[in-house]
Image (cartoon, rainbow, N blue to C red):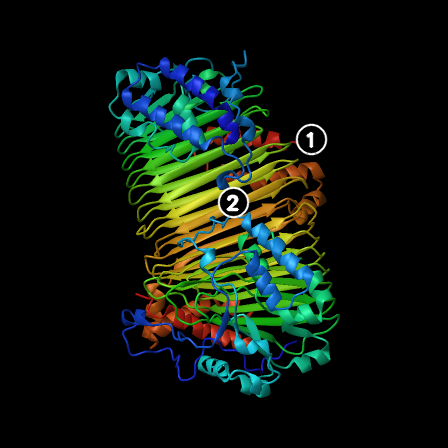
Amino acid sequence: MAAVMQHASAYLERFSSSQAGRDWEPKWLRERRELAMERFLRMGVPTPRDEEYKYTDLRSLSDGRFLLSPDEPGGHARPAHLAGQRIAAACGDSLAVAGPAPPGIRLMSLSEALVRGEPWLEDRLASVASFERHALCALNTALFEDGIVIVAEAGADSTEPLHLEFGPGRVARLARVLVIAERSSRVTVVETYSGLGEYWRNAVTEIHVSENARVDHVRAQLESPRSFHTGVVQAAQERDSRMSSFSLSFGARVARNDIGTRLDGTGCDCSLDGLYAVRGHQLVDHHTGIDHAMPHCHSHQLYKGVLDGNARGVFNGKIFVRRDAQKTDAVQSNKNLLLSDSAEVNTKPQLEIDANDVRCTHGATIGQLDADAAFYLRSRGIGEAEARKLLTYAFATDALDRVGVASLRERFEALLLDRFAPEAA
Amino acid sequence: MYTYKYRLVAAWRRPGTQYTMSTAVDPLEGLASQEYKYGFVTDIEQDTLPPGLNEDTVRFISAKKGEPQWLLDWRLKAFRYWQGMKEPTWPNVHYPPIDYQAISYYAAPKSAEDKPKSLDEVDPELLATYEKLGIPLEERAILAGVAVDAVFDSVSVATTFREKLAEAGVIFMPISEAVQEHPDLVRRYLGSVVPPSDNFFAALNSAVFSDGSFVFIPKGVTCPMELSTYFRINAMNTGQFERTLIVAEEGSHVSYLEGCTAPMRDENQLHAAVVELVALDDARIKYSTVQNWYPGDKDGNGGIYNFVTKRGACRGRRSKISWTQVETGSAITWKYPSCILIGDGSTGEFYSVAVTNNHQQADTGTKMIHIGRNTSSTIISKGISAGLSNNSYRGLVKIMPRAEGARNFSQCDSMLMGDRCGAHTFPYLEVRNKSAQVEHEATTSKIGEDQIFYLNQRGIETEDAVSMIVNGFCKEVFRELPMEFAVEAQKLLSVSLEGSVG
């Protein structure tokens, strides 16, 4: 906090200069941005004294140097061979939306939507993801320059994944995505984050799932090993809607993902899953939050982590069951595999339950590779390194089964295998 | 091995009160009116300090007890720590701010100035209080075989069976006496597990602790009987600040019981105790608690604030500390009996049943800190919430980098009775060694209508059915209690939850 206060003027300067260039924006958004900036300055970049950031130290970001510094030149790194033909890429200073959208899906940049004055924006943008108590979400809200909007029109059924790529570049630094699935629609969105060098990406994705709609969201964080990645994915679900989220986190030096959904109607279903595999001095932190605000909803969470080297994994899964949210069925599991003596896991599966007719379970395990299984493989002529790799792969792969898009799952499996290739290879 | 033939302290039992489980009242409606059964006040002339806390208060308490200089210095140091500390706000409990200057920090029955040597010398009014509570003190001396270091308010008034224990070499006495008789032992271990600077309430306790128990089991001795202490908060506006210290030397064994009840009050009473356990090589300490303090009335008025720091250090190899607690009382419970597993191969255990009803709030759990190699810990926590209460489990399992081969299993289950109560789980798992195996499981459930229906159709009344199901839910913990304690605990649970099913 103190550190932020030191740099408050720098943040403010950046804010006022960007506000100045945005006089075309609607009044409500300008007001929201101002409120968000005020909130950010009050909260500051979180420190480990903040319970939600107990294990994740972001203090080195507080001077705002990544925000205020000029862009790194060049680097248009793009992860190859990821599924999805429709690509909206935010690599440079502007957004490029490539290809015609599939039927029933509208794909546009946020500025375009704002200029057109789309009437639904005010209700959705910067309102699904609350910035009241989330400093980094507030910062993004105050400063984002542009973003991507995906609208699935009522009844649209698109199983073809829409792929959003966020590479380096100014616009992508404060990535902003808004997904709106109208009544009885279906849409699959894949976000990929990658880059080169040292930078801080602070991304926010808001997802509104209307009645009986379905959104499948996949997020692949493959950032540069020197970067900081902080991301928020927040969904709001209406009755009988379905939402799935998968978070793959392999990159970044420090990655923090806040993934949550609010079940605002009865009969909702959601699953939040993820896989993190880190090594070296990486830190990956997932905070999930499922807010069972209404009865008769189901939620499922499976997060698996593999930690090697001096890496640290953090998981905090919250399940809130509000008063009268009866018949809630919530399952949460976090499993971690430690491959080295200096790796560390901090996990906190948290239940807060205020209704009685519910079934909530959570489990967390932390362990190492099974020595017996490794011995078995070796007795069958498989070398030690290969056996380790196989067992690690076997541990992680059932999390990948939660990825619905087959082509994507294959790509992730390949990435995973690469990751556990014996060091010498 | 311990034998269980002794009649134990039944703090919640009162002669003439029947705890038969079937009642004529409609079990679904009429039972919420169950009032606290032990709310009565004994009028004893108190030697009480006026409310307020400053260095002079600390000096007064110390002087009153004729303490040596080192202890006074220790208290003053703790007091200065406390002055610089803030009351913690992180527990999931809510209460109006406590005015620490409005509390009286010392109350001793007059007769304590001249300690009684036998029961005849004990204030008859005190004895009458014990009678009311159903503790047959005289009887117990002959029949029960349990040495009771009864803390009435702040000063211990009667200790039995000291001779028998002395024969075995066991020291079991009020800590204020131990300071006089065994100053070296007390000085060596006091504050070594819970240092005065540990937390806000521990610092407060260190500064103003009035009395408590001191237990020392010498090398190789198995304590010949279960040790039991009995607390009761009596004087109005008097916080109780007990300090318990148990030291088990190499190869010794001890089982210690603690059971509580308190009279009915309108004001909230603060209780900030500190319990320290030290287990050396191959020593075993089993610490069992039944806490049944006044929980406040059904509208949430009154009740005890129970902010306790309990911690055990397994310093020796293969040492073992086991905490068992049945928490049914207090308006607010805030306590985390913990184990620091330093010695290689040491074991920590925590078995807990926490019941909250009406407006009670409990934030309880444990910490298992694995430092030595091949250390293991087990956590079994059962939380039952009813009425408008909130019950939180908060636990930490920490495996340090050098704790090769550490093993932990945690299970925390919650049961919700009624749709206006809350159950919360905050387990922290911090693992820094790959050879560790850590497992945590938690479930939340309610008593199924089908289960009750099944028992009903077998001719078991709803009230009994609930009691049966709840006791089944808690069985894993109850079986850790000394046998008679377990029987009482089951009854206590039924009483605590009466009227909460519907």
Q: Does residue A144 appear left or right of residue A396 in this picture?
A: left
Q: From the viewer's perspective, is residue A393 above or below residue A323? A: above
Q: Quadrant of the C terminus of chain A?
A: top right
Numbered disc 1: secondary structure: loop
Q: Residue sitting at 47 percent across and 13 percent down? A: A92
Q: Using a 10 Å C-alpha cutoff, classify the residue at mark 2 as few (fewer than 14 neighbours), some (14 to 19) or many (20 or more).
A: many
Q: Amino acid at mark 2?
A: Asn
Q: Are marks 2 and 1 on the same chain?
A: yes
Image coordinates of residue A23 in percent, x first then y, are 32, 14
Q: Residue furthest left?
A: A119
In the depicted view, which residue is nearer to us: A286 or B67?
B67
Q: Height in image: A425 above or below A357?
A: above
Q: Earlier along the polypeptide chain: callout 2 or callout 1?
A: 2
**Of the residues tagged 2 and 1, which is closer to the observer?**
2
Q: Nearer the viewer, residue B488 or B38?
A: B38
Residue B294: where, in percent of width, then height?
A: 42, 68
